[in-house]
Amino acid sequence: MQISSQKVATFHYTLTNDDDEVLDSSDGGDPLAYIHGTGNLISGLEQHLEGKGAGDQFMAAIAAAQAYGERDEELVQTLGKESFAEIEDLRVGLQLEASGDDDESRIVTVVAVEGDRVTVDGNHPLAGQTLHFDVNVVSVREATATELDHGHVHGPGGHHH
Ligand code: ZN
């Protein structure tokens, strides 16, 4: 069976950046499970998985636009420390949930704390980066009606509920 829309596929992967640093990997755990064509994965990776079958192995370099997007410098903001009064352990690298004007919350990362000024970055940590995936497809099957309804995979590598 080949990967196509509404199939459940599982795969092992190692994700590296342009500097060959490993950012993420499924090594030592369950393979990642997803439903093809439902936006579970970044679009560039789905395109490479399309048509692949169990046992297929490939490398894919995915540009930022097909991964987590280009960086948007408008999402970097410097605020007064008083805005973070409730945060006990304010430090560089801390990720916070911020609510924006549109009521949508987004994750921001503290990138600088200088005096009473705090700079946060609302870009995804992988925004602006080309991602290099080393992929090994483990299995492909039909999604169940319940999985399609929930929009996620049940069982190993997916949700347990
Ligand atoms: Zn579910």
Image: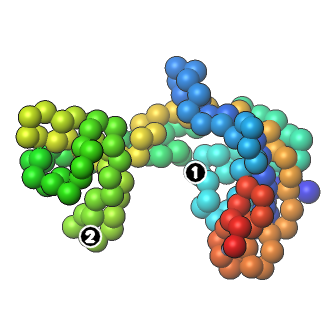
Quarter of the image for residue 22 reads top right
Q: Position of residue 49 (x, y in %)?
A: 74, 48
Please tell me the numbered disc located at residue 30: none
Disc 1: which residue: 42
Question: Looking at the image, which residue is at 28% across and 71% down?
Answer: 103
Q: Position of residue 120 (x, y in %)?
A: 24, 44
> Residue 116: x percent and y percent?
8, 40
Q: Quadrant of ligand 1?
A: bottom right
Q: Are marks 1 and 2 in contact (CB under 8 Å)?
A: no
Identify the residue position indicated by label 2 in the image. Answer: 102
Q: Is residue 51 visible?
A: yes
Front position in the image: 33 or 42: 33
Question: Looking at the picture, which amino acid does disc 2 mark?
Answer: Asp
Q: Is residue 112 left or right of residue 19?
A: left
Residue located at (10% from left, 52% from top): 82
Q: Tell me which numbered mark, 1 or 2, is placed earlier along the sequence.
A: 1
Q: Is residue 94 left or right of residue 54?
A: left
Judge whether 133 appears above or below 140 on screen: above
Residue 151, compared with residue 90, is above or below; it is below
Query: Does residue 121 appear in the picture of this structure?
Result: no
Q: Quadrant of the C terminus?
A: bottom right
Kind of element beneath mark 2: loop
Disc 1 residue type (three-letter): Ile
